[in-house]
Structure formats: structure tokens, C-alpha cells
Image (tube, grey):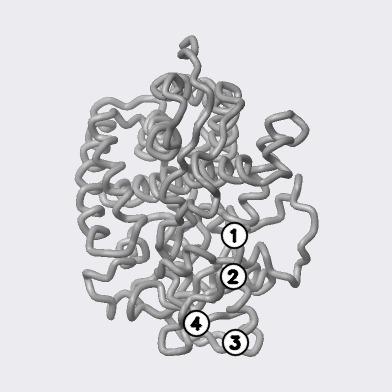
Amino acid sequence: MTTSTGPTVLVDGTQFPLYAEEFAADPHGNYREMRRRYGSLVPVELAPGVSATLVIGYHDAVRILNDPEHFPADPRIWQQNIPADCPVKPMMEWYPNVLRNAGEAHRRYRQANVHAVDGVDLHGLHAIVEREAIPLINTFCENGSAELITQYAFPLVFAGLNDMLGCPPEIGQRVAAGMAALFDSVDENAELGMQTLSGALLELIELKRREPSDDMVTRLLQHDAGLDDTEMLANIISIYGAGLEPQQNLIINTLRLILTDDRFAGDVLGGSLSTRDALDEVLFNDPPMANFAISYPRQPMLVGETWLPAHQPVVISLAGCNNDPAIGGGERIGNRSHLAWSLGPHACPAKSVASLVAQEAIDQLLDALPELRLAVPVDELSWRPGPFHRALAALPVVFPACPPLNVK
């Protein structure tokens, strides 16, 4: 956990700006200050002028996540008054996909998505990660240094996700550029990112109609839900959104923990604690999507002693709830009671896939470079601002240079 540097400055003395650099630098300090001032439900800004309620109480979050009737994920009324150039609008507005719908529409999209994910061969996924990891490690192993986001985690996750979706590299490069702009959600680049992403994915859909294969896009197309092109586009964007940057951040945040925390730095590399244990710790403290699972109450809702206004965003702080003192701060090793995968009808259907990719990616790197260490002091690492993600700007490392690994 980051050492507290004090709370961020409040907007108008009342709202915490989740987009601020100060928040990104010390979210846990801010969660503590939020809890002191407001308890479980906190007034925040997701972008300048965009108000929301952040839920940092575990029990209130569980209630909300399991009550889609009163807390649906459909933002269409809310977004009517949000300007087109709002930096968080592309991440929050309505699309015909599994993430932004409720009721029968959500069930239909959910069934198609679960079908697409369930077709992924987990055994084959090990081989895919190894196939991508070793050539990436070989590009920097002789240098004795690397930046693990750009040189390892991102290209590995990107290639693996493209493989699962059946997306060729020339389309995938444009997908990556669009997703990166979307997840920053701090300036006008978000709107341009959506345009870039949509154009690339429409090409992918057309490709899979002509040339179906054993991949997630083909399974979406062939599902009984009968998704049209607009629905296909929206649901593939949702899959990329869940699988690209959050997956990269999970790998990087876990590597940061392994390299900087004495409980792991000595034991993981020595074999006493597993990579799985480190992943569990990160999913509690620094989940890659720290604040998300957004809903919009149909009517004013009383939660505890606080009235939540109708049609205004309620954001679950997965990180804040995981560290709620009301549920105790017990042992995290082997404990998977966190909310990092969300709960209820919108819970992540791909957590087995995501966990396997992250664990395999980390193990491949540590097996190849067992003396890996940070190239800078941990307090010189910086976190990217943004209301939703928990993401390092870079993870530079050094290690004894070694010859390339044999590619199988």
C-alpha cells in the first residue's frame, strides 16, 4: 500500500476529484479520508463537473451490485445532459452491450458473452502465453534492463487477446491505440479513441462473417442471440475494455508488489509464496479497475442514511470496499473474497481466463529473469491519473543480462 501523502484537495470543499493526480498518487489515503468525512457513500467528481457517488462500504456495495432492479447499469437518462466532449462519457455512455444494459437486454448480451468466453481453451491458453512471452523477453534480456509495460505486459496481453478474439495484427494495432485513449479518460483523446476503435472492429466483424473460425468473435456472431453489427461492435469493445488494459495493469501491479514488498520479494522468487498469492493481494489492494461497476438508480434510493439521487452515477470503489475496516483487515493470502471481479449479474465472466493469463505471464518472466529488480526507488514510480483504473505510468527494471531463451 502506498504511504499516505495526505488527502487530495476537495472540489468546492465537498467532492473528491477522482481524476486528479493527487488521488492517483495516494488513493488509499484518500479512501481513509473519504470514510472519515462521509462514511460509506462519498460525493466525487469523475471529471470536472461530472458528479457521482462513490461506494466505499463493502456491505453497501454488495447490496447495490446484487440489486439491478433498483440499480440498473443503463445510463441513457443520465447522459442526456453530459456534453459530447466530456472525457469520461465514452467510458460511461450507453451502448447495446453487456456492460450498459439491464433486464432482458442484459441477459441476452450476457448469454452471448459467456458463450464466447467459455469456448476459450484454458489449456491452450498456457501455450499461447508462453509463445508470446519468450520472444518478448528475448528482445530485452541481453540489455540488462527493460520497461515492463511497453516491452512486456502490454504486447503480451494484446497478442493473447487478439488470438482469443481471432483479430489479425494489422487490425489489432488500431484497437490498441483506441483502447489506450479511452482508458485515460482525462482529455478529448477519449472521443478520438472511440472512433479509432470502432473503425477497426467493424473490419474485424466483417472478416469473421467471411472467414469464421474457433474464436470469440465468431462465437458471438453464431450465438442464438443473433447480434447485429452494432451490437457486435459494442460487445467486442466491452471484451477489449475488460481484457486489455485491466489485464495489463493486473500483471504490472502484481510485479510491482513482488519486486517491492519483502513478504513477496524474497518468498515468491524462492518458491514459498506463489504468484497466485501475489495476485490475490493485488486484487484486494490495487485492483486494475479500482473504481467502476457503475449503476444509475431508477428513483431516489435510501442507502443507510444517504439518499442517492435518481439517474446519477453510483460507482463502486472495488479498491475502497476491499479495504473497508468493517470487514476486517485479515490475512489476504489465499483469500479471494475481494470485489475485484465485481458481483451479481454483471460479475466478470472471464476471471479464470484473466487469472491464468496474468499468472502465466508473471511466471514466465520471473523464471527467465529470477534476479529482476526495480531500476528506481519504489517512491519514484508514478500512477497514471484517471477515475477508473489503477495503473502505473511505467515499471522500469534491471537484471543481469543473459542470452536469449530457446523458442519452442
Residue 371, can we see it? yes
Q: Is residue 147 above or below residue 281?
A: above
Seen from the viewer's position, the closer of residues 62 and 271 is 271
Which mark, by number, is residue 29? Answer: 2
The tag earlier along the polypeptide, 2 or 1, is: 1
Q: Name the amino acid, label 3.
A: Leu
Q: Name the amino acid, label 2.
A: Gly
Q: Is residue 247 above or below residue 303?
A: above
Write the residue at 20% across / 56% down. 192
The tag earlier along the polypeptide, 3 or 4, is: 4
Find numbered disc 1 in the image and state the secondary structure of the residue it sits on. Answer: loop
Circles 4 and 1: CB atoms closer than 8 Å: no
Residue 219, can we see it? no
Find numbered disc 4 in the image and state the secondary structure of the residue it sits on. Answer: strand
The tag earlier along the polypeptide, 2 or 4, is: 2
Q: How far is the residue under mark 3 from the one under mark 2?
A: 27 Å
Name the mark nearer the viewer: 4 or 1: 1
